[in-house]
Image: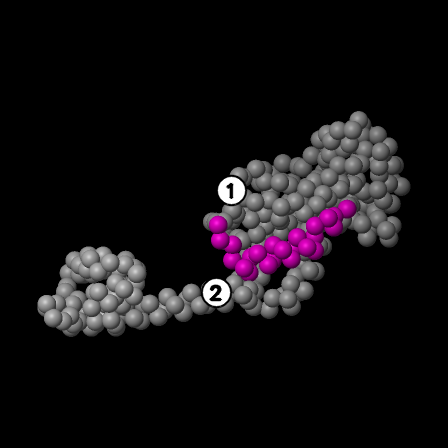
């Protein structure tokens, strides 16, 4: 339809089908057929034709006015989009897991906003998997690679797991040295948002990563940082990401235990839908996060 409208405007400007055909690089019969189809669809005659001249009808004059306005709006939209491709602008919505978001990503975002002042960031902190299309997200970071084939997952790094406890808890309950001693300890559990089941702890046993079910009377939903708070206050043993407790370990608020079974890690992935066209505002955020986060986990 757009091609017919453009040919109609060209015919009106040139005053003949032949001149419009030359300008458009098509044959006069092709122009005539296009105008005839347009008139049939509209149910009006746009041109008054004689053997010597062609002119717009009254309906054709009105239609030309509307077509010029519409084409002008389209050209403005194209120019705006082309400008956006040179200067990133618009809104980007990103979902981040709570601990990684608070400790690693949010501190970086002011720098991104300084680099790209016309890009607005909408950040969701959640440990739940998001529906990119249904929920309107452009990007997400998750701590495990997703199974969905319609997502691109760029590996940012591996976050190592550690088991920690407060010195007060260990002095009161003893320091575990073997995995079979975990049953005698209070183990703080994090419940998966998708199922409500506790996340199994993982240990390196004879060179292989193996899950171990743990027991405990304290569990936390939604926010893994709540588990760290419980551990700091002598609530029990906790397996968590090293990057979440590295300052606590350095300052002695928490102590690492069961080191002989350490070595397990989970992958952090930057995820986004596969698209033929990715807006520049999204591409620059992808590049920025990959630049800042790739290989930065411990």
Range covered by the magenta-colored residues:
276-298
In the rendered picture of this protein, how many numbered marks are placed on residues?
Answer: 2
Residue drawn at x 40%, y 69% is 76
For disc 1, the neighbor class at 10 Å (few under 14, some 14 to 19, many from 20) is few
Q: Is residue 261 visible?
A: yes
Q: In which quadrant is the N terminus drawn? A: bottom left
* In the depicted structure, whether residue 46 falls above or below residue 136: below
Q: Position of residue 128 (x, y in %)?
A: 58, 46
The kind of secondary structure element at disc 1 is loop
Residue toward you, 216 or 237: 237
Task: For the residues labelled 1 and 2, say whether their Cβ atoms are less than 8 Å apart.
Answer: no
Residue toward you, 98 or 205: 205
Q: Residue furthest left?
A: 50
Nearer-N-terminus badge (1/2)? 2
Q: Position of residue 43 (x, y in %)?
A: 15, 60
Whether the magenta-drawn stretch holds residue 281 is answered as yes
Residue drawn at x 51%, y 42% is 150
Picture quadrant where residue 68 is located: bottom left
* In the depicted structure, whether residue 84 falls above or below residue 105: below
Read off the residue under disc 1: 150
Residue drawn at x 78%, y 32% is 204
Q: Is residue 38 visible?
A: no
For the residues marked 1 and 2, what is the alpha-carbon distance in whole angstroms?
27 Å
For disc 2, the neighbor class at 10 Å (few under 14, some 14 to 19, many from 20) is few
Residue toward you, 135 or 234: 135
Q: Position of residue 29 (x, y in %)?
A: 20, 57
């Amino acid at each position: 339809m757009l091609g017919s409208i453009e040919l109609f405007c060209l015919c009106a400007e040139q005053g003949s089908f032949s001149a419009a055909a030359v300008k458009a690089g098509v044959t006069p019969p092709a122009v005539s057929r296009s105008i005839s189809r347009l008139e049939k669809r509209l149910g009006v005659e746009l041109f008054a034709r004689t053997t010597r001249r062609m002119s717009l009808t009254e309906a054709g004059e009105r239609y030309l006015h509307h077509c010029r306005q519409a084409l002008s709006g389209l050209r403005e939209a194209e120019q705006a989009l082309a400008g956006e491709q040179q200067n990133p602008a618009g809104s980007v919505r990103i979902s981040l897991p709570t601990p990684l978001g608070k400790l690693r990503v949010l501190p970086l975002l002011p720098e991104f906003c300084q680099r790209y002042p016309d890009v607005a960031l909408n950040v969701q902190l959640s440990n739940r998997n998001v529906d990119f299309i249904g929920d309107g997200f452009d990007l997400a970071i998750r701590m495990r690679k997703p199974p969905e084939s319609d997502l691109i997952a760029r590996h940012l790094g591996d976050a190592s797991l550690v088991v920690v406890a407060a010195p007060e808890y260990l002095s009161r309950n003893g320091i575990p040295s073997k995995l079979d001693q975990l049953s005698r300890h209070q183990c703080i559990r994090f419940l998966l948002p998708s199922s409500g089941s506790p996340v199994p702890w993982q240990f390196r046993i004879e060179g292989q990563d193996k899950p171990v079910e743990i027991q405990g009377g304290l569990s936390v939903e939604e926010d893994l940082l709540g588990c760290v708070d419980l551990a700091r206050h002598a609530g029990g043993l906790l397996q968590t990401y090293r990057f979440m407790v590295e300052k606590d370990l350095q300052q002695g608020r928490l102590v690492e235990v069961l080191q002989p079974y350490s070595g397990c890690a989970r992958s952090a992935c930057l995820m986004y839908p596969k698209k033929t066209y990715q807006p520049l505002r999204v591409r620059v955020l992808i590049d920025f996060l990959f630049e800042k986060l790739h290989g930065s986990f411990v």
